[in-house]
Image (cartoon, grey):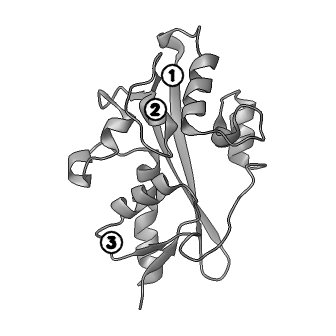
Amino acid sequence: MKKELFYATNNPGKVIEVLKFLSNSGITVLTPKDLKIKLDVPEIGSSLEKRIFESKSLPGIHVRRWKDGQTKMTDEEIIDYCLSRMKNVPITKRGAQFRTVLVLGIPGGGIEVYSGTLKGVILEKAASLRVEGFPFESLFYVSEWNKLLGETHHMSMEEKRGRLNHRERALEKVIPRIQELIT
């Protein structure tokens, strides 16, 4: 039996990341592009969104539409906008975190939710490093690693040991369940 997983994202960077993470799992990852599905999920209404806005944390799930809630921004526009909004914020008050929530659709209609978090600091100036589809990789410094998030992006899984980002932390939790469902 084929082991296939539909990963509902249009972000090529996220696709590369999950392919790398699952490279030795025997699971084939299919995307909307692979299946010729046009997928543009509106970034509205969710409990994660509600919690984010209640706590006044930005940009939340609206990263690509952060500036005005409508217009899709490029990576560079996001970097510039973030830095301009934080221009007078001292480094001691630039704590931030990434949180990913993965929803696994279960055959028969149920869902299961898995999450991963990564804490760090938004730097006062962007590093020259750029990772397409991940604008914060040049801004987000992870103190526990003593590295910029983007510095780990092109590392092998062996080199990254102990340095999983928020998505990989969530994937690490969900993979055993996926393996269970597709065996």
Q: Which percent across, then down, holds residue 64?
A: 65, 41
Q: Which residue is mark 1?
A: 95
Circle 2 Cα neighbour tier, 10 Å, few/some/many (<14 / 14–19 / ≥20): some
Residue 53 in which image quadrant: top right
Identify which amino acid the numbered label 2 is placed on: Lys
Who comes first in sequence, dot 2 or dot 3? 3
Who comes first in sequence, dot 2 or dot 1? 1
Q: Which percent across, then down, holds residue 69?
A: 77, 38
Q: Residue at x 60, y 31 (%)?
A: 77
Identify which amino acid the numbered label 1 is placed on: Gly
Circle 1 Cα neighbour tier, 10 Å, few/some/many (<14 / 14–19 / ≥20): some
Q: Answer whether labels 2 and 1 touch (C-beta < 8 Å).
A: yes
Q: Which residue is mark 2?
A: 119
Taking 103 as reference, is 128 left or right?
Answer: left
Mark 2 to mark 3 CA distance (whole Å): 27 Å
Q: Which residue is mark 3?
A: 25
Where 175 sits versus 153, above or below? Answer: below
Mark 1 to mark 3 CA distance (whole Å): 35 Å
Q: Residue at x 70, y 40 (%)?
A: 65
Identify which amino acid the numbered label 3 is placed on: Ser
User: Residue lying furthest left in this view?
Assistant: 158
Where 169 sits versus 32, above or below? Answer: above
Which of these two is toward me, 35 or 176?
Answer: 35
Q: Secondary structure at mark 2?
A: strand
